[in-house]
Amino acid sequence: MIIFPLAFGNNQYLELNVSISAIWISTLFANLIALDHMYKEDYDDGTLLYYIVNRVPLVTIVYAKCLSHWLFSGLPIILIAPLCSYIFSGYNENNLNLFISLTLATPIFTLIGSPIAALMLGSSSRGAALTFITLPFYLPIIIFGVMGTNINNSNINAEFYLLLAILSIGIIFFPMITVKILKGMIN
């Protein structure tokens, strides 16, 4: 994140826009890097098969995996982002908006990525394919998040409501889709 504002000089308005974009791009990359290993180890060593044979509910496993993925890839970005925004741009008027939009968007990143990570189990070119398949689904979340973070936005709540609607729908449907995909991959 340090490289982004250094490339644009002293213009503070430009630094503010660059710092917001840098934080969102860093959030995207942190999520994608951790997403590759979400189910891979459990699939490789047979733990997922063990869960199915012993009738452990996969819904619980998927929610636990999503929660741990979010705790280790999303939460640190949420906590550090307002500080980075202040350091890079010198403004702190948008820190609350940045915090709220990242708090809503990072769980959505995890929930959207969960079925895609399960779908890519057993693939030889897993990392690159996972990135290219996941990015189009992340773009609306990034757009709404950046728009919600913008200080000049007069209708700030609309983006937050959209992110909250996507999160409330995604928290139910994406883990269910992931369970179906995992059962299909193991059987």
Image (cartoon, rainbow, N blue to C red):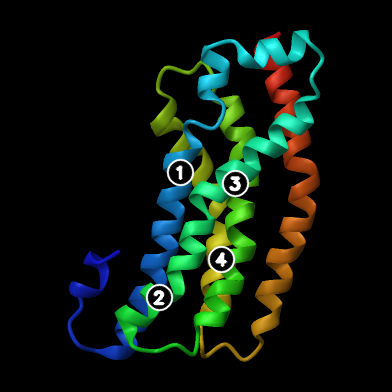
Residue labelled with disc 3: 110
Disc 4 versus disc 1: distance between alpha carbons? 15 Å
Q: Amino acid at mark 2?
A: Leu
Specify the quadrant that holds the C terminus: top right
Q: Residue at x 46, y 60 (%)?
A: 77
Which amino acid, mark 3?
Thr
Q: Which residue is mark 1?
A: 32
Residue 124 percent location from the top left of the image: 42, 17
Mark pair 4, 3: CA separation: 12 Å
Instruction: Report if the CB atoms under discs 1 and 3 are less than 8 Å apart.
Output: no
Please report whichever mark, 4 or 1, sits nearer to the chain's N-terminal start: 1
* In-image side of 59 versus 95 (left or right): right
Q: Which residue is mark 4?
A: 102
Give whichever of 81, 175 is nearer the camera.
Answer: 81
Given the image, on which type of amino acid does mark 4 rest? Leu
Q: Is residue 131 above or below residue 99?
A: above
Residue 137 shows in the view: no
Of residues 101 and 132, which is closer to you in this image? 101
Mark number displayed over residue 83: 2
- Cα separation, mark 2 vs mark 3, equals 23 Å
Q: Earlier in the sequence, mark 1 or mark 2?
A: 1
Q: Considering only order in the chain, which callout, 2 or 4, is on the residue closer to the N terminus?
A: 2
- Secondary-structure class at tag 1: helix
Marks 1 and 3, how far apart in space?
9 Å
